[in-house]
């Protein structure tokens, strides 16, 4: 087989492949067997029709077509390996010549990863947040803990922001009740930001037993987008009462006997979290600094596929929410146009990141051990709430184990970048990532296990 490469652009090539007929023999034998199974010829059992009879009855073109359908995709794969290009799209293949018994020729146009060099990343300077824990950090965590143990107490006053109300809701259009837009005994925190515009404003100042109506646009159901009168009937008003910060609260909310012990534990955990954040920031900022040094043309097909995938996921999220598109974007305080612009930007970055990390993986000869793959599956299974063996089987059945391994080695490439950087915090202190790995994961960290330890130190996104 002979392959010639023509560069159509920095991100697209045309392969011209010439193949001697002898190399088609396995595919041709398979084609005869397949056609023999499909045709019926008197005097011959299915699958036993000789090749010469098939050609006499149905023509050699039938066999050649089946042969090429089987052989060309395989030959294309071999050609790609021979010329060392990295396709990022499905090829446009055309058989341009069939010299029966001698050779065939076909062309394949395909988008590829462009050629580029990765600059030296040793000593890239990055700045990360300080790991110093302030009293304010501890107070923030304590307040969040108090919120979890808050109680609701009924009050004989009008509702205000932060109060909880229990209410009945119904909607009417031109005086006609909309059955699917009714809900009873709904508990809601005033000021939480309902997708039903005007609800928070209407609730403020209402007391138990009062009824009020307001006009708004419905956000779900058959009448989504229509203006309606929404009638609120407040059944009760409750205020949130936070527990006192004392030893009794510490015993209620934790395994500690005193508030001082609880604060000390929160401070230590906060410090650990900040150390992990330093590792993550060092890796991401090193990658960002490296990306800024490289100008990589992006294949249009790969960019379009990435953007389309994100749009598809967005459509699925909106459908699952039960909201109209307008209500969905209003809930997340954005617009469809802003989200699409974000998709374009993030998709371009994601493709560029993949190209760069793959280069580092190859340069550093990074691989995936069986234990690393197992750890990956276990972590993902925990996140998804499924059994690890179920996820592993799903990945295997759907040919996704390769994608999992790509994700693992790319994470290891990020670790390489972070470890190679010169890292300081916002206070000007030098940050030793390896010391952080040791502190977080224990003294057993060894040189050959640094990548795995670093991965353990990074919380999953």
Image: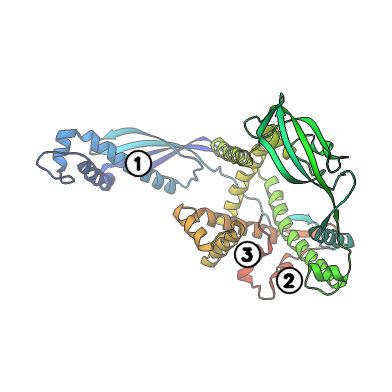
Quadrant in the picture for the N terminus: top left
Determine whether the residue tagged by mark 3 lies in a helix, strand or loop.
helix
Q: Looking at the picture, how far across and down is residue 338, in whole percent?
A: 71, 34
Q: Quadrant of residue 135?
A: bottom right
Q: Which residue occupies the foreground of this view, 444 or 312?
A: 312
Q: Looking at the picture, how far across and down is residue 416, in whole percent?
A: 65, 60
Which mark is first along the chain, 2 or 3?
A: 2
What residue is shown with label 2? 439
**Residue lying at the far left of the rendered structure:** 43
Quadrant in the picture for the C terminus: bottom right
**Which mark identifies residue 451?**
3
Q: Which residue occupies the foreground of this view, 312 or 164?
A: 164
CA distance separating discs 1 and 2: 55 Å
The residue positioned 57% from the left and 63% from the top of the image is 378
Characterize the local packing of mark 3: few (<14), some (14-19) or many (20 or more) Cα atoms within 10 angstroms: many
CA distance separating discs 1 and 3: 41 Å
- Which of pointers 3 and 2 indicates the residue nearer the eye? 2
- Residue 246 to residue 283: above or below: below
**Which mark identifies residue 170?**
none
**Which mark identifies residue 72?**
1
Which mark is first along the chain, 3 or 1?
A: 1
The residue positioned 41% from the left and 46% from the top of the image is 77
Q: In the drawing, does residue 230 fall left or right of residue 134?
A: left
Q: Which residue occupies the foreground of this view, 62 or 427?
A: 62
- Residue 146 to residue 204: above or below: below
């Amino acid at each position: 087989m002979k392959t010639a490469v023509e560069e159509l652009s920095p991100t697209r090539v045309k392969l011209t492949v010439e193949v001697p007929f002898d190399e088609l023999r396995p595919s041709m034998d398979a084609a005869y067997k397949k056609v023999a199974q499909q045709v019926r010829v008197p005097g011959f059992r299915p699958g036993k029709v000789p090749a010469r009879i098939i050609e006499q009855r149905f023509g050699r073109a039938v066999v050649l077509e089946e042969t090429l359908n089987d052989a060309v995709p395989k030959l294309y794969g071999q050609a790609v390996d021979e010329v060392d290009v990295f396709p990022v799209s499905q090829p446009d293949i055309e058989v341009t010549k069939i010299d029966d018994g001698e050779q065939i020729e076909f062309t394949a146009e395909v988008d590829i990863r462009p050629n580029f060099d990765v600059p030296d990343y040793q000593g890239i300077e990055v700045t990360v947040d300080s790991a110093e824990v302030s009293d304010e950090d501890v107070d923030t965590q304590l307040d969040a803990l108090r919120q979890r143990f808050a109680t609701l107490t009924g009050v004989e006053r009008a509702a205000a922001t932060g109060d909880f109300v229990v209410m009945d809701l119904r909607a009417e259009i031109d005086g006609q009740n909309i059955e699917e837009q009714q809900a009873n005994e709904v508990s809601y925190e005033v000021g939480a930001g309902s997708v039903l515009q005007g609800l928070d404003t209407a609730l403020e100042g209402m007391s138990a037993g009062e009824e009020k109506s307001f006009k708004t646009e419905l956000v779900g159901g058959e009448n989504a987008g229509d203006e309606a009168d929404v009638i609120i009937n407040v059944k009760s008003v409750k205020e949130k009462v936070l527990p006192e910060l004392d030893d009794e609260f510490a015993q209620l909310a934790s395994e500690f006997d005193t508030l001082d012990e609880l604060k000390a534990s929160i401070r230590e955990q906060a410090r650990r979290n900040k150390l992990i954040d330093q590792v993550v920031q060092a890796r991401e900022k090193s990658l960002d600094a490296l990306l800024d040094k490289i100008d990589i043309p992006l294949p249009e097909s790969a960019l379009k596929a990435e953007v389309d995938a994100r749009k598809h996921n967005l459509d699925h999220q909106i459908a699952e929410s039960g909201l109209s598109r307008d209500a969905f974007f209003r809930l997340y305080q954005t617009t469809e146009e802003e989200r699409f612009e974000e998709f374009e930007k993030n998709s371009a970055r994601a493709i560029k990141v993949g190209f760069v990390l793959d280069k580092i993986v190859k340069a550093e000869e990074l691989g995936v051990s069986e234990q690393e793959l197992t750890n990956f599956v276990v972590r993902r299974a925990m996140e998804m709430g499924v059994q690890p063996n179920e996820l592993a089987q799903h990945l295997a059945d759907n040919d996704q184990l390769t994608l999992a391994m790509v994700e693992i080695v790319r994470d290891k490439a990020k670790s390489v970048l972070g470890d190679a950087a010169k890292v300081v915090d916002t206070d000007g202190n030098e940050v030793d990532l390896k010391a952080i790995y040791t502190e977080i994961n224990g003294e057993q960290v060894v040189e050959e296990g640094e990548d795995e330890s670093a991965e353990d130190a990074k919380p999953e996104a």
